[in-house]
Amino acid sequence: AWLSAGLLAQAMCLAGGTSAGVCSFFASMSCIVCPFLEAWSGVRLTAQSWVAATLAVTGTGFLCLGNGALPTSGDLLGLLQPVLLGIYLFRTERRMEDIPGKAMELTALQSLMVFLVIGGGWLLGASALAATGGGAGALVLRL
């Protein structure tokens, strides 16, 4: 569910006018959220871990944020991405500690969840558009 929510936040961020570079920068910030979640859960992190996370975000920022675009309304939704994706990564790591050797099963379950949440939302949205005579939704349902 956390992964689905993070991907939906990413899609809404892009739909809100945020550039792909800025949106990808927001997603990369999950590598900063994860150490905070680890520390909050009682794990003692080394200074090297904090430096690595900071350098990763700084480097990605240089790569993604160089076009000088002004903030958009989608940027607010984009800021949800690192939090939601960070929680997803943190919880996945914790779960893998409980069930070692079950990575494929966990990945399959996560993929199914993303499909159900996003696919179900898409079908509901397309159905609503078709019911009201909306063009794209009606077209999708006729296919």
Image: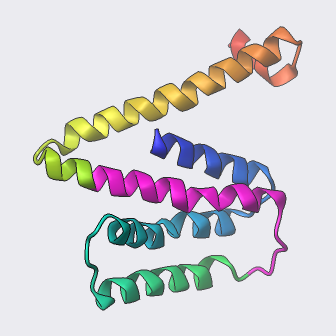
- Which of the two residues, 3 or 62, is positioned nearer the viewer here? 3
Q: Is residue 125 positioned above or below 5 on the image? A: above
Residue at left offset 64%, top offset 26%: 122
Does the magenta stretch mainly form a helix, a strand or a loop?
Answer: helix
- Residue at the right extreme of this rendering: 133
Asked whether, in this view, residue 82 is left or right of residue 23, the answer is: left
- Which percent across, then down, holds residue 5? 55, 43
Work out whether residue 138 can be spotted.
no
> Based on the displayed image, in which of its 4 quarters is residue 102 positioned?
top left
Asked whether, in this view, residue 104 is left or right of residue 135, the answer is: left
- Which percent across, then down, holds residue 37? 39, 65
- Which percent across, then down, holds residue 32? 46, 73
- Which percent across, then down, holds residue 71? 82, 69
Magenta stretch encompasses residue 88: yes
Q: Is residue 40 positioned above or below 98 on the image? A: below
Work out whether residue 79 can be spotted.
yes
Residue at left offset 60%, top offset 85%: 62
> Based on the displayed image, in which of its 4 quarters is residue 87 positioned?
bottom left
Asked whether, in this view, residue 86 is left or right of residue 109, the answer is: right
Q: Please state the extent of the stretch shown in magenta in the rendering.
A: 67-93
Residue at left offset 60%, top offset 66%: 26
Q: Quadrant of the C terminus?
A: top right
